[in-house]
Amino acid sequence: MRIALFGDIHANLEALEAVLEDAREQHCSDYVCLGDVVGYNA
């Protein structure tokens, strides 16, 4: 089992999509977001 950990997205959809694509290529079965999903000063 591989787990993808990510955080500090700050509403950067392009970067998030790149991270998720890489996680799929690495055959991750679970995903954990560690926070800071919305933009700065939200």
Image (cartoon, rainbow, N blue to C red):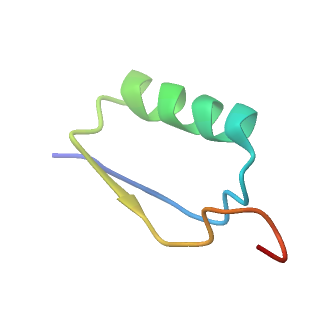
Q: Residue at x 42, y 22 (%)?
A: 25
Q: What is the number of callouts on the image?
A: 0
Q: Residue at x 62, y 71 (%)?
A: 36
Return the residue found at the far front. Answer: 42
Q: Quadrant location of residue 23?
A: top left
Q: Residue at x 67, y 66 (%)?
A: 8
User: In the image shown, does 29 or 16 lie closer to the viewer?
Assistant: 16
Residue 40 vs 2, above or below: the answer is below
Q: Going by the image, does 7 lie left or right of 11? A: left
Q: Quadrant location of residue 9?
A: bottom right
Q: Residue at x 83, y 71 (%)?
A: 40
Q: Position of residue 3 (x, y in %)?
A: 29, 52
Residue 42 vs 9, above or below: the answer is below
Q: Position of residue 42 (x, y in %)?
A: 76, 73
Residue 29 vs 42, above or below: the answer is above
Residue 4 vs 40, above or below: the answer is above
Q: Quadrant location of residue 17?
A: top right
Q: Going by the image, does 13 lie left or right of 17? A: right
